Every structure is written in C-alpha cells, then in structure tokens.
Image (cartoon, rainbow, N blue to C red):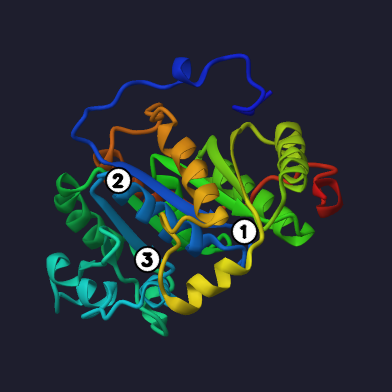
C-alpha cells in the first residue's frame, strides 16, 4: 500500500538524512485551479516563518501570479526582469510583514508561460546562490500539467498536491500525479484536501489513493485537510494571512502545517537545492513529448 497513512514501514526508514545546510525545497501544485493552492502556500510560508525558519516563497504561477496580491505587497518587478537582466535576484525578493520573503512571478506576461532551457538555467543559477540564505523554499506553481508546472514540481525535493472533494478536482489531481510520475519520475507526493470536513477529506484521499495504487507506482502521504470557512475569503480580502489569530481555522492550519513540517526529509531524490538545480536542467533536456501510456480502465469514472 503506497500511503504513509497505511504503510507498515515507518517514514523514518524511508528517508536519508540531509546536510543541515541544504534548504528544503517544496512545490505546491494542483491539477485544477481554484482549490486554494496559493492560500495554502502563503499560510505554510507564514507558519514556517513564525517557527523561526528562513523562508522564500517563489510565485511560480508565471504569467498569472498573485501571491503578491494575496499579501498586499508592492513589488519592484518580476521574474521576467531577472531573465532580461534588468534586475538582480536580491532586488526582486520582497520581504513581507509575516517574516518571509517572496519572489514575484509576474501577472499578464505571456513571455513567462513557457520558459526555455536557458531561461530555466538563469532562474536556477540565481536560486542556487540564494539557497544558503534559507531553510525552506516553497514554490507555488500554476495549476494543471503545463511545462512550467512539471519543471518546478519534478525538481523539488517534495511535491505537495492540493485538491478538493469536487470530482473534477480529484480527476485532475490524479492526472497531475500520473503525468509527473510517468514523464518526470516523481514517485512521492504529499496530499492536502481543502474545503472539506474530516470525513469527506478522507473519502477523497482514499479515492485518489485507490486509483493511484492501481495504475501508478507512487507513494501518497496524506497530510490532512482544511475545512471550508468564511475566514478564508475575509483573509484574502484583507490581504492578510490568518496565522496565529486565535480563530478555529488558524489553529487548524497551525496543526496541519506542524505535521507537514515535521515530516522527515526525503532524500531518495534530492540533496537540497543542489539537486533542484541539476535535476531541473536534466529534466528540461529530456524529450517530454512522448505520450503518457494509457492504462485500461483509468478513465475519469474510475477516479471518482
């Protein structure tokens, strides 16, 4: 059974210790938009910063970035300025009052929607240099299975997938995991079910786990769920995270992310940012145009 919730093998036995100086690199992705992926990215960054970690949140939803909007930040440019050489990484990184740094991705910029290998290398060269300044690097990717999503997610130490109980979200989350595992050899995923109660979240995860176990060679680690709450909309409208405000949702968020950050680091794929740098480039040079094998019976109806 490929689930941390059900595996008899302790996670500790599956992970290899990492160099203490290597930052943890975690991508946050979703098969479908509108599931709360960026909300989770921002709150995970704020929670980790509140624990004393040095955190960089990269808005990698290139072309449609909105982390800066959710935080009410005034930015001096975007990743496009980094690629053009107009700005340095240091000048683009924007600190926020929650105690973490943001690298803005840029909104309404078509040029960023599909990075070429040279552009990817520019980004990774600069991030490699900046990595020594952080304990945790979070990458908020775009939704879906576009090239940029696969590029950032497959090169991360850990891939976190966010979904909701909605059947389309479940189906698209499976599609994302399938493509990442078959085209980019990603085998381990963390999963958070958003906008759900405890029972619906478990049902949703077990459906995803069932079809993944049947058709894919992957390991799914259920982190937990976040309930629906009017506080989410209020937080977005106020452009202020809910961290440590005493609300029920805030306490739930803190408990969820305490569990996530306590997970032992998995270095079967990585050696920190060095791996991120090298594996990203090698993945980009692979032939990604090969069709994904189709499994008989793995239609959408089989997922939901």
Question: Crowdedness of circle 3 by 10 Å Cα count: few (<14), some, many (20+)?
Answer: many
Q: Is residue 76 above or below residue 58?
A: below
- Write down the residue under mark 2: 136
Q: CA distance from mark 3 to mark 1?
A: 17 Å
Please give the name of the residue rendered at 34% of the width and 71% of the height, measured from the top-left corner: 105
Which residue ends up furthest to the front in the rendered image?
A: 246
Please give the name of the residue rendered at 35% of the width and 49% of the height, measured from the top-left corner: 280
Q: Position of residue 159 (x, y in %)?
A: 48, 45
Which residue ends up furthest to the bottom in the rendered image?
A: 108
Task: Return the mark for residue 6.
Answer: none
Give the structural element (helix, strand or loop) at label 3: strand
Q: Position of residue 276 (x, y in %)?
A: 31, 44
Q: Is residue 17 left or right of residue 144?
A: left
Please give the name of the residue rendered at 44% of the width and 39% of the height, measured from the top-left corner: 258
Please give the name of the residue rendered at 49% of the width and 57% of the height, measured from the top-left corner: 40
Q: CA distance from mark 2 to mark 1?
A: 23 Å
- Write down the residue under mark 3: 59
Q: Nearer the viewer, residue 293 or 51?
A: 51
Q: Is residue 64 above or below residue 18?
A: below
N-term-proximal mark, 2 vs 3: 3
N-term-proximal mark, 2 vs 1: 1
Residue 263, quarter of the rendered image? top left
Give the structural element (helix, strand or loop) at label 1: loop
Between marks 3 and 1 in the image, the one whose residue lies nearer the viewer:
3
Q: Position of residue 69 (x, y in %)?
A: 40, 78
């Amino acid at each position: 059974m490929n689930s941390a919730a059900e595996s008899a093998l302790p996670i500790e036995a599956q992970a290899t210790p990492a160099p203490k100086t290597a930052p943890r690199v975690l991508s946050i992705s979703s098969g479908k938009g509108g599931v709360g992926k960026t909300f989770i990215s921002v709150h995970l960054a704020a929670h980790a910063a509140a624990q004393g970690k040095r955190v960089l949140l990269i808005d990698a939803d290139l072309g449609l970035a909105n982390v800066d909007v959710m935080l009410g930040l005034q930015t001096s440019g975007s990743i496009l300025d980094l690629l053009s050489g107009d700005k340095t990484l240091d000048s683009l990184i924007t600190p926020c009052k929650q105690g973490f740094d943001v690298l803005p991705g840029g909104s309404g910029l078509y040029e960023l929607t599909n990075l070429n290998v040279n552009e990817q290398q520019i980004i990774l060269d600069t991030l490699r240099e900046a990595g020594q300044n952080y304990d945790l690097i979070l990458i908020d990717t775009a939704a879906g299975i576009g090239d940029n999503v696969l590029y950032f997610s497959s090169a991360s130490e850990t891939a976190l997938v966010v979904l909701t109980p909605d059947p389309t979200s479940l189906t698209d989350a499976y599609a994302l995991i399938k493509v990442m595992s078959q085209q980019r050899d990603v085998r381990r995923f963390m999963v958070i079910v958003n906008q759900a109660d405890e029972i619906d979240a478990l049902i949703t995860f077990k459906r995803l786990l069932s079809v993944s176990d049947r058709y894919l060679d992957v390991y799914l680690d259920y982190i937990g769920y976040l309930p629906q709450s009017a506080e989410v909309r209020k937080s977005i409208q106020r452009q202020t995270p809910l961290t440590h405000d005493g609300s029920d949702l805030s306490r739930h968020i803190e408990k969820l992310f305490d569990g996530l950050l306590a997970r032992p680091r998995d270095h079967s794929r990585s050696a920190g940012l060095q791996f991120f740098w090298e594996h990203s480039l090698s993945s980009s040079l692979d032939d990604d145009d090969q069709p994904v094998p189709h499994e008989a019976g793995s239609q959408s109806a089989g997922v939901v």
